[in-house]
């Protein structure tokens, strides 16, 4: 089996089912798992399904540690609700037995503010490595907030958001001016150290980036997602729309069945 495994699902619901199952299976096999988590619209369904499984006593999450990919900088003081810390509380943490003290953001270590981002990396290393890194995908091909132009060996650092990212994320803010222009993000080098990577994407807006990924077959700085060609254990779980532009003869090389 190749390094990249592509699974095409019918829709977002099927993607969320599969991604949540992979994560819950991991935690059931290793209760002190280190989960790398993403925010945005893509993982919301996955988190909902994890919450369902928690409520059905199918998983216990109290020993897991979580490491989020990124966090905004320069959010307006009264705009905490747009922080990724708030998002994670709302969409996962507060609805399960995940312990707040075991949740880590590049700008927060447990409950403590952190602006020495090497300490975030040290924290990951202290617990070994990230067992599963969940990723969404920007329409411009970013993963985390590693925008086009990011080098393959980048670490957790302050990044400037691309204009296309600011435009796309403005849907969550009162106005485009309120969207932060900077964030702290795990680097591509940080992401590639995870044991296993799950990238989830749905909708036709992601189709171009996905097509380019399969066309390149190696890392190019203009498409940060293409760094995943340098990793040995990547699952790309997408819907038919996101897969619609992939060159047909590439499909057979990477496609695996969703059992
Ligand atoms: C979020 C993150 C971003 C998003 C990407 C896709 O933590 O790192 O890379 O995954 O911008 O966002 P959605 O899912 O809203 O399309």
Image (spheres, rainbow, N blue to C red):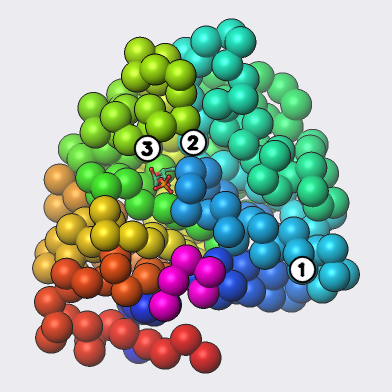
For the stretch drawn in magenta, the main secondary structure is: helix
Ligand 1 closer than 8 Å to label 2 CB: yes
Mark sitting earlier along the chain (2/1): 1
Q: Marks 3 and 2: CB-CB under 8 Å?
A: yes
Decide: few, some or many residues near mark 2? Use Cα within 10 Å; few <14, some 14-19, many ≥20.
Answer: many
Q: Which residues are magenta?
A: 10-14
- Observer able to see residue 223: yes
The local secondary structure at tag 2 comes to strand
Residue 202: % across, % down: 38, 62
The residue pinned by badge 1 equals: 53
- Observer able to see residue 129: no
Decide: few, some or many residues near mark 3? Use Cα within 10 Å; few <14, some 14-19, many ≥20.
Answer: many
Of residues 152 and 199, the one nearer the viewer is 199
Cα distance between the residues tagged 1 and 3: 29 Å
Ligand 1 closer than 8 Å to label 3 CB: yes
Ligand 1 closer than 8 Å to label 1 CB: no
Residue 23: % across, % down: 63, 67
Of residues 249 and 155, the one nearer the viewer is 249
Mark sitting earlier along the chain (1/3): 1
Q: Residue furthest top?
A: 77
Q: Quadrant of residue 184?
A: top left
The residue pinned by badge 3 equals: 145
Q: Which mark is residue 70?
A: 2
Quarter of the displayed picture in which ligand 1 can be seen = top left
Q: Quadrant of residue 169?
A: top left
Q: Give the vertical position of 69 relative to 116 (above or below).
A: below
Of residues 208 and 134, the one nearer the viewer is 208
Cα distance between the residues tagged 3 and 2: 7 Å
């Amino acid at each position: 089996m190749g390094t990249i495994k592509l699974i095409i699902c019918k829709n977002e619901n099927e993607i969320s089912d599969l991604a949540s199952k992979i994560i819950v299976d991991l935690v059931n096999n290793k209760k002190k798992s280190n989960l790398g988590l993403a925010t945005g619209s893509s993982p919301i369904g996955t988190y909902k399904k994890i919450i369902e499984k928690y409520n059905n006593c199918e998983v216990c999450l109290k020993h897991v540690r979580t490491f989020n990919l990124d966090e905004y900088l320069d959010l307006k003081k009264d705009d905490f609700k747009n922080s990724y810390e708030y998002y994670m509380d709302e969409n996962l943490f507060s609805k399960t037995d995940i312990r707040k003290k075991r949740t880590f953001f590049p700008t927060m270590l447990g409950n403590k503010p952190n602006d020495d981002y090497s300490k975030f990396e040290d924290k990951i290393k202290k617990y070994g490595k990230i067992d599963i890194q969940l990723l969404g995908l920007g329409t411009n091909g970013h993963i985390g907030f590693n925008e086009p132009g990011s080098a393959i060996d980048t670490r957790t650092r302050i990044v400037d958001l691309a204009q296309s990212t600011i435009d796309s994320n403005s849907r969550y803010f009162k106005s485009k001016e309120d969207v932060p222009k900077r964030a702290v993000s795990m680097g591509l080098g940080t992401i590639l150290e995870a044991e296993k990577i799950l990238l989830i994407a749905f909708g036709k807006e992601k189709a171009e980036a996905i097509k380019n990924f399969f066309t390149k077959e190696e890392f190019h700085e203009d498409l940060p997602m293409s760094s995943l060609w340098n990793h040995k254990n990547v699952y790309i779980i997408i819907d038919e729309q996101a897969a619609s532009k992939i060159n047909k003869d590439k499909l057979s090389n990477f496609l695996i069945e969703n059992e």
